[in-house]
Image (cartoon, rainbow, N blue to C red):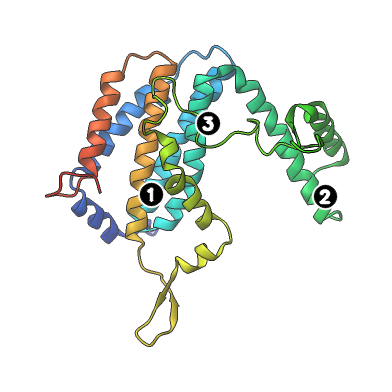
Amino acid sequence: MDEKPKAYGFPEEWHYFCGRFPSLQGKLTGFFASAQKIVCESRVIAGPADRVVYFLGNACIEDFNEILQLGFNGYGIGALKLLRGLYERTITEAYLANKPDATERFLDFGDVQFYRAVENVLHDFPENPPLTEAQIAEVRASFDRLRSQFENKCDRCGHPYPAASWKSHYTLAEKGRPPHVEKGKPWLDHFVFPYYYRPTLELHATRQSIFSRLAVTPEGLLRFKSEAQRKESEDAMRAAHHLALATLEIQNRYFNQGATDEVDSRHADFLEAWAIPGSREVQ
């Protein structure tokens, strides 16, 4: 007889979050029903900009689901690591929805990024090339074709240097604010530290990524904290839910779906879902 499949995860953590946020599960069910219709449903794609905006939106919804899987099981720091990518994808989706003409530059930068990855490997591990000689030659030819498009110039000497991003001199604060949101009013750029920079410190091999996992015992010794990271889970899931709502709004506006009332309802659900019982504010 086949062994019964084992359930992975920590049910006690699921029960904790369902008890702390009693309406969350139901509101998430409503959100994903709206996301399926507004973001993930098949549609006619008119060109590269439509494709990139559409598939970035789908990726954002999947990111949100992944963050929930980790967060509901108490892996809050793991959820924060994924939050960084979700934030970047969301604001890129918003930027390209506002400026579709930038799509080609966004796509071309993929060749630049791949070239840099290949050259770094070849420099550090020349005895173990990641591609065949013909493939490497093709990667270099693609980069040479695009090189001049992705160079900045030093303000003092005028010497060119490689651009760090496909958007010249961009900042996260400017990269994606929709036209209907006035400058100075809160939008995703106001959350750049908790949604992007804080998770980045956990994602990489940093001092923060070590210290956030340590605790001091009563004897004054350091130990690695293996228990559930509930505060980080809450932070990551709430932030991801906020970003996923932005994706609903971006997709609805870009593809003219006429679902503004439904998006507004999902925003109201968000506020209710994350309110602590007895409190009038989202924590």
Identify which residue is drawn at 77% across, 49% down.
Answer: 120
Q: Which mark is residue 122?
A: 2
Q: Looking at the rendering, which quadrant does residue 102 occupy?
A: top right
- For disc 1, the marked residue is 236
- For disc 3, the marked residue is 175
Badge 3 or badge 1: first in the primary sequence: 3
| 270 sits to left or right of 161 | left
The N terminus: image quadrant = bottom left
Instruction: State the SS at label 2.
Output: helix
Instruction: State the SS at label 3.
Output: loop
In this view, 201 is above or below 116: below
The image shows residue 11 at horizontal and vertical percentages of: 28, 58
Choose between 63 and 10: the one closer to the eye: 63
Identify which residue is drawn at 41% across, 47% down.
Answer: 67
In this view, 152 is above or below 98: below
Looking at the rendered structure, the kind of residue marked 1 is Ala
Residue lying at the far bottom in this picture: please name it. Answer: 219
Residue lying at the far left in this picture: please name it. Answer: 278
Looking at the rendered structure, the kind of residue marked 2 is Leu
Q: CA distance from mark 3 to mark 1?
A: 22 Å
In this view, 19 is above or below 46: below
Check if mark 3's residue and mark 2's residue have beta carbons within 8 Å.
Answer: no
Residue 88 appears anywhere in the view:
yes
| 139 sits to left or right of 240 | right
Looking at the rendered structure, the kind of residue marked 3 is Lys
Check if mark 1's residue and mark 2's residue have beta carbons within 8 Å.
Answer: no
